[in-house]
Image (cartoon, rainbow, N blue to C red):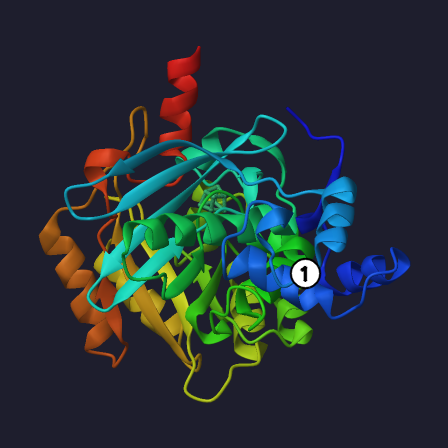
Amino acid sequence: MISEKKSIKRLTFDELQATLEIMGLRGYRAGQITSWIYQHYAVTFEEMTNIAKGERDQLAAAFSLPAPSLLQAERSSDGTRKFLFGLEDGHAIESVLIPDDDRLTLCISSQVGCQQACRFCLTGQGGFARNLLFYEISDQVLEVSRILRNEGSRGITNIVLMGMGEPLANLEEVLKAVRIITSDRALGISGRRITLSTDGLVPEIDALGRAGVKVNLAVSLNATTDETRDRIMPVNRRYPLMELLAACKRFPLEPRRRITFEYVLLKGINDSEDDALRLARLLKGIKCKVNLIPFNPFPGSEFKRPVDISVKRFQKILQDRHYTVLVRESRGRDISAACGQLRERASAGRH
Ligand code: SF4
């Protein structure tokens, strides 16, 4: 049910400060409230014991403090965990927690569904409902952190915006969410540990560069000719490869940082030796690393996973040309691995 009171999380820090002053509360309470919500996981104003009782009552009368509901959680045999969260308006989004050596990476969603319609992606096939608001993006980090704290587990170390949605198509809200995730008053995760992944929205890559937010950029490339990329990623018809790579070249990188190019290997489509050679030529002059992701078929998908030997051959061609290339397996294959699958299954179960 949608609460009639406004969620306090809908206010940015500056808006909260201004609102508190209008209510006759001291501006510094904004920092205390933020810390209670994001660092002490408070779910009521009553818990905020360093705020005077009368002021807590005033806050509770004016605001709600809702959290997304956890609709479903699954754990894979490889340690990957998926969480399906319900939003106030009944939509559901998913977040995936991926343990890896000393890292614990949370993959979060930025939209309900996605408009980009990449042919190899289940989320892309499911259509688009709406953009997430900034606090719905940061809440995924907050809620999974809360779960980990309650379990006594180690906390999230890295964030990737590679779940449902194209983050750069919702850039304004994503940037506000990043401010909460990185703020020392809130979730306190360094921007160097946050990666935004785009399918290639050139004006927004430039806008992200201008925004001065120190996060990592990943580009989902997946093809070495416009012909193939047009076919598997409709965004390429608006921003062809050369425009995209030019935007990558001019993207301002911090010292020692690199752009990550994601390349989903689709059998017989983009996994040939010629593709690998072309990719090596295309990326020349860009400070980058490459993640090769053998396609993980989902029910009804038109593509196949390449055999391991062609994955290795592709990797070697790039490595021989001095690229850093990792082969990344889709994690959590036994629990609906690709983004969108948990949501699809949950909604399939509802109908
Ligand atoms: S791969 Fe990413 S950008 Fe493409 S449809 Fe899927 S969620 Fe959207």
Q: Residue at x 19, y 78 (%)?
A: 320
Q: Does residue 190 sit above or below 50 in this rendering?
A: below
- What quarter of the picture does the C terminus occupy? top left
Task: Specify the quadrant of the image occupied by residue 304.
Answer: top left
Q: Is residue 256 visible?
A: yes
Q: Residues within 10 Å of mark 1 (few under 14, many from 20)?
A: some
* Mark 1 vs ligand 1: CB below 8 Å: no
Most extreme residue toward the top is 351
Give x and y (percent) for residue 244: 55, 64
Indicate the quadrant containing the N terminus: top left, top right, bottom left or bottom right. top right
Question: Residue, x 69% and y 57% (percent of image)?
Answer: 172
Question: In the displayed structure, would residue 14 be above or below residue 46?
Answer: below
- In this rendering, would 210 be left or right of 162? right
Q: Which residue is mark 1?
A: 51
Residue that sits furthest to the bottom in the current view:
255
Q: Position of residue 193 (x, y in %)?
A: 42, 71
Q: Is residue 127 left or right of residue 149?
A: right
> Dividing the picture into quarters, in which one does residue 181 lie?
bottom right
Is 57 located above or below residue 192 in the figure? above
